[in-house]
Image (cartoon, grey):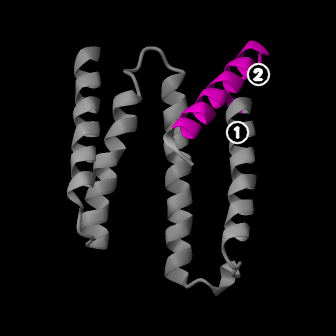
Amino acid sequence: MNEVTVALLAACVAGFMAMMVRAGISPNLRVAIRTTLILALVWIFAYANQKPISLLALSWSVRCMVVLSGLAIALAWFFHFRGLRQPETPSVAPMDRINVLFAALFAVLLLYGPSAQRFGLGALLLVSGALILSWNRN
């Protein structure tokens, strides 16, 4: 899959979301529909691309990390969409982009992984863009 395909698919998603807005579907229902479809596709891809294992076969610590990761993403989506609906709050775009910095810090601190220069440059550019976005909002 190349960049053009991804861009076309993103445009289709935006178009479909706009059609749902025009149809009068509430924001919460739109998110629920999208999330349900993504969930189904992720399970299909997980079983199609890898030999399935029992979730009970995973160690206790791995199961805890999976649950904590799921809770974190659920809260992130909740606050992201809540922020999008409140016009008096600053834009959520800078905070949506600054997560790359946190991911890089967690990867270095928790996983002790070496960070590649390209990854570091990309994170720096995204953080710079987030700071510029937040600076222009004031």
Q: Residue 50 occupies which quadrant of the picture?
A: bottom right
For residue 138, say whether it is visible.
Answer: no
Seen from the viewer's position, the closer of residues 4 and 58 is: 4
Q: Residues within 10 Å of mark 1 (few under 14, many from 20)?
A: few
Residue drawn 54% across and 41% down? 77
**Mark 1 — residue?**
34
Residue type at tag 1? Arg
Q: Which numbered disc, 1 or 2, marks the residue that appears first in the sequence?
A: 2
Q: Residue 106 occupies which quadrant of the picture?
A: bottom left
Residue drawn 52% across and 51% down? 73
Residue drawn 25% across and 16% down? 136
Residue 27: in magenta span:
yes
Residue at the farthest right position: 23
Residue 85: in magenta span:
no
Instruction: Indicate the position of residue 28 as horizontal and vertical percent values.
Output: 69, 30
Residue type at tag 2? Ile
Seen from the viewer's position, the closer of residues 101 and 71 is: 101
**As drawn, 85 above or below 120:** above
First to last magenta residue range: 4-28
30 relative to 9 in the view: left or right? right
Q: Tell me, for residue 25, which label it has, or none.
A: 2
SS class, disc 2: loop
124 relative to 73 in the view: left or right? left
Determine the main secondary structure of the stretch shown in magenta: helix
For residue 119, say whether it is visible.
Answer: yes
Instruction: Indicate the position of residue 46 as horizontal and vertical percent values.
Output: 67, 66
Instruction: Indicate the position of residue 82 as horizontal and vertical percent values.
Output: 53, 30
Q: In the rendered view of the protein, which quadrant contains the C terminus?
A: top left
**As drawn, 136 above or below 47:** above
